[in-house]
Image: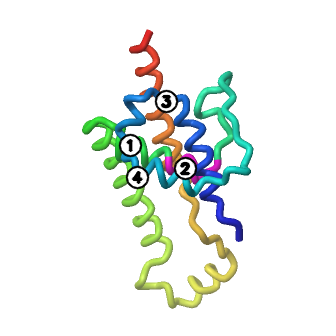
C-alpha cells in the first residue's frame, strides 16, 4: 500500500506558497519543516490559479491536513467553537445511528443476524458533509477575507 502522505505534504507546501506570510507565520516552523522534509519532491502538483480552493483536485489527506491547519492555527475562537460543535453533533448522530442499527439487546436474535449477513454495509458512510469539506469552506471564507483586506 502506497504512503500517500508525502504527496499530500507536497500539495500543502504548494498551497502555502499562495497564503499570506502572516498566516504562514502562525504555523510552527517544526510543522512546516516536517512537510518540507517528508514531501514527495518527485510528485508533480501545481496550483491552477483560475480555480478556487474547493475546485482544486486535492487528495483527501491534503484536505484533512488543511482542515487541521485551519483549526489549530488560523481559526478564531468562535470558529473553533463552531467547528467543534459541528463535529460533536456529527459524532453523536453517528453513534446514535450505530446504536440503533446494532443494538446490544437484540443483535443475537436470529432475524437480526440474518439481516446483517444479507446487508454487510460496513464501513458506515456518513451522508453529511465530510469534516474536511466543512473546514475547506471555512478556509475559503478566511482566505477571501484576507484577500479583501489586502486590497
Q: Residues within 10 Å of mark 4 (few under 14, many from 20)?
A: few
Relative image position of residue 25 (x, y in whole percent): 37, 36
Q: Which residues are magenta?
A: 59-65
Secondary structure of the residue carrying numbered label 4: helix
Q: Nearer the viewer, mark 4 or mark 1?
A: 4
Q: Is residue 108 left or right of residue 145?
A: right
Q: Nearer the viewer, mark 3 or mark 2?
A: 2
Q: Nearer the viewer, mark 4 or mark 3?
A: 4
Q: Nearer the viewer, residue 38 or 127?
A: 38
Q: Is tag 3's residue or tag 2's residue first in the polypeptide sequence?
A: 3
The residue wearing badge 2 is: 36
Q: Nearer the viewer, residue 142 or 101?
A: 142
Secondary structure of the residue carrying numbered label 3: loop
At x 47%, y 22%, the residue is: 144
Q: Nearer the viewer, mark 2 or mark 1?
A: 2
**Alpha-carbon span between mark 4 and mark 2:** 10 Å
At x 44%, y 78%, the residue is: 103
The residue wearing badge 3 is: 19
Q: Is tag 4's residue or tag 3's residue first in the polypeptide sequence?
A: 3
Relative image position of residue 132 (x, y in whole percent): 50, 47
**Alpha-carbon span between mark 3 and mark 2:** 16 Å
Q: Is tag 3's residue or tag 1's residue first in the polypeptide sequence?
A: 3
**Alpha-carbon span between mark 2 and mark 1:** 13 Å
Instruction: Tell me the chief SS of the magenta region.
Output: helix
The residue wearing badge 4 is: 30
Amino acid at each position: 500500500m502506497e504512503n500517500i502522505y508525502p504527496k499530500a505534504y507536497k500539495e500543502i507546501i504548494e498551497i502555502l506558497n499562495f497564503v499570506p506570510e502572516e498566516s504562514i507565520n502562525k504555523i510552527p516552523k517544526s510543522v512546516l519543516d516536517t512537510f518540507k522534509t517528508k514531501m514527495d519532491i518527485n510528485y508533480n502538483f501545481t496550483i491552477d490559479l483560475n480555480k478556487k480552493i474547493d475546485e482544486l483536485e486535492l487528495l483527501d489527506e491534503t484536505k484533512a491536513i488543511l482542515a487541521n491547519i485551519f483549526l489549530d492555527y488560523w481559526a478564531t475562537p468562535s470558529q473553533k467553537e463552531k467547528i467543534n460543535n459541528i463535529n460533536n453533533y456529527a459524532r453523536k448522530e453517528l453513534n446514535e445511528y450505530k446504536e440503533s442499527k446494532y443494538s446490544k439487546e437484540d443483535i443475537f436474535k436470529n432475524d437480526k443476524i440474518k439481516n446483517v449477513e444479507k446487508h454487510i454495509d460496513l464501513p458506515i458512510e456518513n451522508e453529511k458533509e465530510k469534516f474536511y469539506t466543512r473546514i475547506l469552506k471555512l478556509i475559503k471564507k478566511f482566505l477571501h477575507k484576507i484577500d479583501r483586506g489586502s486590497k
